[in-house]
Image: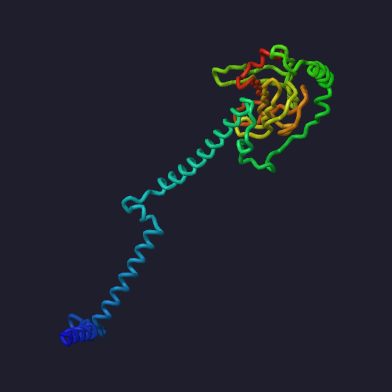
Amino acid sequence: MVEEQNKKEKKFIRKIRDQYRLIIYNDTTFQSVWSTKLSRLKVFTITSLLSAVIVVLVILLIATTGLREYIPGYPKAEYRQMLVRSALQVDSLETELKKRDEFFKGIQAIVSGEVPEDNLIIETEVEPNEIEFQEYNHDSVFQDKLLAEQLSLSIQNNENKNTGLSQIHFFVPLEGVVSNQFDAGKDHFGIDLVSGPNARISSVLGGTVIFAGWTLETGYVMYIQHESNLISVYKHNAELLKKTGDRIKAGEAIAIVGNTGELTSGPHLHFELWYEGKALNPEQYIDF
């Protein structure tokens, strides 16, 4: 049994190693044109190498040319670009939605009289070194307001801390004209004041700055916490003169009127007044 198997193996090896001659004749003269010796092993080896080379060349041809787009199920170039662009847009939208939600949570905490967490402050892609500040002559702008400020301060310091809103004396935040009035039905929880260029913005009451920074929609913004659960908001400023944590006196200059942020159509101040989490109409308490 073993001998027969060995004989078969030797016979198979002889077959694949047997030499054959391939001859090409001239059909007219029957003269030999070309000849070569071949074996079954050599033919198998050459055929395998040629097949591998052909497969590699076909793969390279399809991968490096536009022929790959004819493969069933392979997306076209414009479709791939659309997919990449859509993925980038979705990622950007998710980031912006997360920032918006965090910002709204911070605003809700502020109007509820709570202190927002530091991570609720929205950071934008604007680098500090890319922001250009204009130089203002603050002394010349504020000099004609000193007398009115001193008079307002004297009235404010003599007030009873427990008086009602109707008895509180509010300092006018900006000398200007009301261009857009309070309308809670349209989600406009404040008024818009238009004034001259480089006009100063003043705090309506004494208090503490709880937020002073940049947001994408409203530009440079400042929130001030006052007594009696009052919060005043100043948006679209060109420059902020105070920072978070600063103590502010009534009538003190806090910012310069500007036109920053996406939700603005011109230089103005958007002013809001909140009491115990509810938006008030500033025109009912301040004589503009």
188 lies left or right of 224: left
Up-down: is 159 above or below 252?
above
Q: Position of residue 38 (x, y in %)?
A: 25, 83
Q: Position of residue 187 (x, y in %)?
A: 56, 21
Up-down: is 110 above or below 1?
above
Name the residue located 59 percent from the left edge and 21 percent from the top edge: 188
Foreground of the two, 164 or 248: 164
Name the residue located 36 percent from the left edge and 66 percent from the top edge: 56
116 lies left or right of 135: left
Whether residue 22 is visible, yes or no, is no
Color encoding of the figure: rainbow
Q: Position of residue 114 (x, y in %)?
A: 63, 29
138 lies left or right of 91: right
The N terminus: image quadrant: bottom left
Name the residue located 30 percent from the left edge and 70 percent from the top edge: 51
Query: Quadrant of residue 197 in the image?
Result: top right
Q: Position of residue 206 (x, y in %)?
A: 75, 23
How many numbered dots are placed on residues in this image? 0
The outermost residue toward the front is 162
Query: Quadrant of residue 8 in the image?
Result: bottom left
Whether residue 240 is visible, yes or no, is yes
The C terminus: image quadrant: top right
Query: Quadrant of residue 216 in the image?
Result: top right
227 lies left or right of 52: right
